[in-house]
Amino acid sequence: MRKNQDYDYDIRNIEVDKRFVIAKKEMLITFIVQLCYTFLMLIVAYATGKGDPKNYSFIMGMPAWWFYALLITALFLILIYYIITKVFVPVSVEPWIEQEQERGE
């Protein structure tokens, strides 16, 4: 650890790394998609899976709630694949590696 580090600085003077801005945007997108998936699955489970199992409706031999859960999962997998390939940005970590090598770590 360096002994001459100055901790008296204004945080507004720090230059924001663009990679952190990209990572924050992607984290928010991921969080929103996960919340939507969770709430949708809860709604489907409670709306179609309540009551006596003898009264369940069946689709292709599966209870309706299970069929809809599989369908929603498949749709969200397609959505996630689209987001990863078209929205998320590949970020290089080269500057981080170069900084580590310069410090000798």
Image: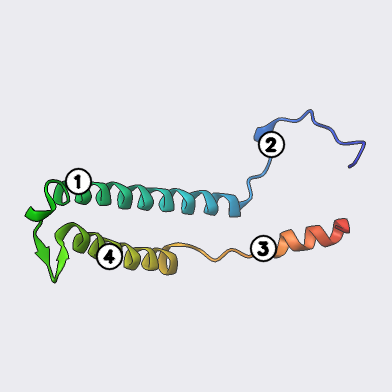
Q: Residue furthest top?
A: 8
Instruction: State the residue position of label 2.
Output: 13
Type of amino acid under label 3:
Val
Identify which residue is drawn at 63% across, 65% down: 92
Name the N-terminal-most of marks 3 and 1.
1
Q: Please state which of the two labelled residues, at mark 2 or mark 3, is closer to the viewer.
A: 3
Instruction: State the residue position of label 4.
Output: 75
Q: Distance between the residues labelled 4 and 1?
A: 20 Å
Q: Please state which of the two labelled residues, at mark 2 or mark 1, is closer to the viewer.
A: 1
Which mark identifies residue 94?
A: none
Instruction: State the residue position of label 1.
Output: 46
Name the N-terminal-most of marks 2 and 1.
2
Q: In this view, does 30 lie to the left or right of 57?
A: right
Identify which residue is drawn at 30% across, 62% down: 73
Q: Where is residue 55 in the image (x, y as percent from the top left)?
A: 7, 53
**Mark 1 neighbour class, 10 Å CA radius: few under 14, some 14 to 19, many 20 or more:** few
Name the N-terminal-most of marks 3 and 4.
4
Q: Please state which of the two labelled residues, at mark 3 or mark 1, is closer to the viewer.
A: 1
Type of amino acid under label 1:
Tyr
Q: Is mark 2 on a helix, strand or loop?
A: helix
The quadrant of the rendering that contains the C terminus is bottom right
Instruction: State the residue position of label 3.
Output: 93
Name the N-terminal-most of marks 4 and 1.
1
Foreground residue, 37 or 85?
A: 37
- Dots 4 and 1: beta carbons under 8 Å? no
Name the N-terminal-most of marks 2 and 4.
2
